[in-house]
Amino acid sequence: MRVPRLEVDTGSLAEYRCLRFRGAMVLMTLPETHDALVAALADRPRALVLDLREVTDVDPAAMGLLLRARDRLRQEGGELLLLVGSRADRPLGPAVMLQVAGLDHVLRLFTDDESLLRDYAPALSSAG
């Protein structure tokens, strides 16, 4: 049996803090996901981007963690934004997994950097 792995890199996308995940977001890698989110949320960002385009699997435990991160950001007046890629490019990728779980209606999903910057940035400008 292969042990799932997850790598997390911290960076930015335009002016937003961004965590880039590679590998499996599953119960066995939950500590890595949790630690990265806690560190990013400590700064109380107005928006936190999670790039999941290189994630191979998202299980219910990881989905629950994403929802808790969204809730915490909202309590602070922030937003959780997920880059999930295209359903066509990755038929079993995070976009499909989150849609099947019904989370595409409660999480802000974007296919690429350009759509996130185009569709989210104006909301920030008008809110200020």
Image (spheres, rainbow, N blue to C red):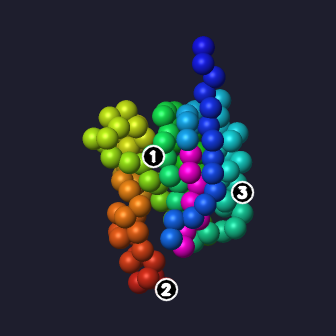
Residue, far top:
1
Cα gap from disc 3 to disc 1, whole angstroms: 21 Å
Marker disc for residue 128: 2
Residue that appears at 42% across and 48% down: 84
Marker disc for residue 101: none
Residue that appears at 62% across and 32% down: 5
The location of residue 85, given as percent across then percent down, is 38, 48
Lower position in the chain sequence, tag 1 or tag 2: 1
Q: Is residue 73 visible?
A: no
Callout 3–callout 1 Cβ contact below 8 Å:
no
Q: Secondary structure at mark 1?
A: strand
Marker disc for residue 53: 1
Cα gap from disc 3 to disc 2, whole angstroms: 25 Å
Q: Is residue 35 visible?
A: yes
17 is higher (above) or lower (below) than 60: below
* Region in magenta: 15-21
Q: Nearer the viewer, mark 3 or mark 2?
A: 3
Cα gap from disc 1 to disc 2, whole angstroms: 30 Å
- 70 or 14: which is nearer to us? 14
Mark count: 3
Graded by Cα atoms within 10 Å as few (under 14), some (14 to 19) or many (20 or more), the crowding at tag 2 reads: few
- 53 or 77: which is nearer to us? 53
Q: Which residue is mark 3?
A: 39
6 is higher (above) or lower (below) than 17: above
Lower position in the chain sequence, tag 3 or tag 1: 3
Indicate the amino acid at tag 2: Gly
Asked whether, in this view, residue 123 is left or right of residue 78, the answer is left
Magenta stretch, main secondary structure class: strand
